[in-house]
Image: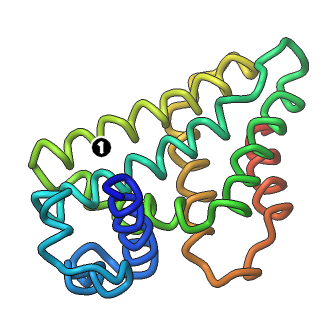
Amino acid sequence: MGNRTKEAILKAAREAFASHSYAEVSMEDIASIAKVKKSLIYYYFPSKEELFKEAWDEAFHKLEDKVFGVSEEDGKYVKKVKQFLRSYIDFLRNERQSLRLIEREKTRLYSEKSQNWRYMKDKYEVFVQKVAGVISSETGRPASEYARAVTDIVGSSALLPEGQMSPDTIELIIIRGIQH
């Protein structure tokens, strides 16, 4: 029962944090969605921040597994970058809730100072550097700022209403930018 209860709480937290900002979500909201008493949440997670970190971390692991789990065989840079982008955009299509959870509080990563927020910020920065590595390994140009733009474009599209910007349009914008 323990693992199922904890997973139900995490699922409710992912849903709540993907739909509303960290500040707008209360432990009561999560308890209501999970159909558990608020005190049970505190049994598994000592604070809202710890619960958010756990939900964010899980969403982030899914993102990294999807995006960087693809083979990085040699080939033309556009083909490799397209493969990377397709994985990233496919994550957007299939794990929209996870990406919304990550993106909704991304700016907060740079203003909060607690250990949990620093952990999430560091993890995000490593992800951006991996994106830069994919791009620069194929273009031969430094790509840190471009990688940040790519993650911002894909990530912010998760916050748009569904269908407002097609994944194909996102890919086209990014590929054209890389080619120039």
Q: Secondary structure at mark 1?
A: helix
Q: What residue lies at 42% left-to-right and 67% top-to-bottom?
A: 14
**Residue 6 horizontal/vertical position (percent):** 33, 59
Q: What residue lies at 73% left-to-right and 82% top-to-bottom?
A: 164
The residue closer to the viewer here, 44 or 86, is: 44
Residue type of the residue flagged with mark 1: Lys
Task: Work out whether 46 lies above or below 87.
Answer: below
**Residue 55 horizontal/vertical position (percent):** 37, 57
Q: Residue tagged by mark 1? A: 121
The reply, left or right, for residue 15 in relation to residue 131 is left
Disc 1 packing (10 Å; few <14; some 14–19; many ≥20):
many
Q: What residue lies at 75% left-to-right and 43% top-to-bottom?
A: 87
Give the quadrant of residue 106: bottom left
Q: Residue furthest top?
A: 74
Give the quadrant of residue 26: bottom left
Quadrant in which the N terminus appears: bottom left
